[in-house]
Image (spheres, helix red, strand yellow):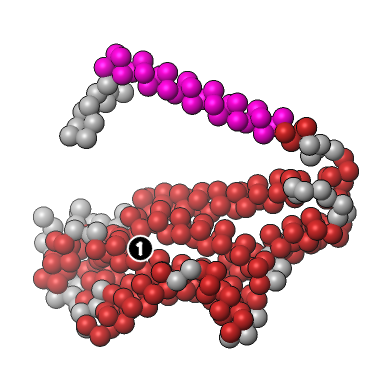
Amino acid sequence: MTVESSALYDIPGPKALARHRLYGGIALLAIAALLGWIVYMLFHTQQFTESKWMAFEYKGVQELLLRGLGNTLKAFGWTVLFALPFGALFAAGRLSDHRPVRMLSTLVVEFFRAMPLLVMIFFIFVALKVAPLWALVAGLVLYNGSVLAEVFRAGVLAVPKGQKEAAFALGMRKTQVMAYVLVPQANRAMLPAIISQLVVALKDTSLGFLITYEEFLHAGKLIATNLDYDLPFIPVVMVIAPIYIGMCLLLSWFARWVERQGRRRPSMRGGAPVASAEVAMGLPPTVQR
């Protein structure tokens, strides 16, 4: 594989390549040493002894973890259900031709993006006296929905301008241009950012333990504080962390699967994306170029 130079990058010469290999080797040795030290400390502090792991054999502990995992997925599910429409609504508002709508949408999005998530959750829980689940969901929806609104808006604006002009030339209204031309083409570009934000929302459900919502991290905290563990609670962390990581990886895999499915479904006829919009609307197709 050849590497081409650009205005920002020059092909390294023999000395630079040797230097890069040296730096890479040093970095690998440093990482290996760090991992070795972590494993040594885990054994040295007796984190793998049977007494610290036998608690997970109890049915009550297993049920507590499963209940906490279910509550985490419940909060995440409600967040996704509301955050995506919230983001789409305010993205459309920010793209509106009506200035009051655009200004109001901008104010809402920028306010909730700037507001710390934990402050919003505590305010909704304490000041408004909302149940822990819905206080957590409301805070996650307001924050992540505002971020998604910017993702949707950027994705629509990234579609080449000629696509919109061609659709208007066919006599389509703005809502039709948005629904049949801009959004379908923007979906592929927006999908990685959308999934990344949903992964953030999934991890942020762990903030629920601060308002006594019995999610997965809260379950781990109960296990660690009610059993004979010495600080730090490494066994509990080693059980909870891989499950969080696995859920995030599963979400990323699902995003890649959706993207592959989208590539297999041609949305263009004859190489013209506007022609597919015509067919979807029942308009007579234009002459293919």
As drawn, which residue projects farthest toward the front?
231
Q: Residue 77 colored magenta? A: no
Image x and y of residue 241, in percent: 65, 49
235 left or right of 78 in image: right
Which sits in the foreground, 230 or 281? 230
Image x and y of residue 37, in percent: 66, 30
In the depicted structure, whether residue 239 falls above or below residue 93: above
Using the rendered view, name the quadrant where residue 75 is placed: bottom right
Q: Residue 15 colored magenta? A: yes
Which sits in the foreground, 265 or 232? 232
**Residue at x 61%, y 49% (from the top left corner):** 246
Residue 177 visible (yes or no): yes
**Residue at x 37%, y 21% (from the top left corner):** 20
Using the rendered view, name the quadrant where residue 157 is placed: bottom left
43 left or right of 163 in image: right
Image x and y of residue 23, in percent: 42, 22
**Residue at x 49%, y 72% (from the top left corner):** 141
Which sits in the foreground, 287 or 232? 232
**Residue at x 71%, y 63% (from the top left corner):** 218
Residue that numbered label 1 is attached to? 151
Is label 1 in a helix, a strand or a loop? helix
Q: Would you call the spot at circle 1 few (<14 residues within 10 Å), some (14-19), or many (20 or more)? A: many
Start-end of magenta stretch: 13-40
Using the rendered view, name the quadrant where residue 63 is placed: bottom right
Which sits in the foreground, 90 or 25? 25
Residue 239 visible (yes or no): no
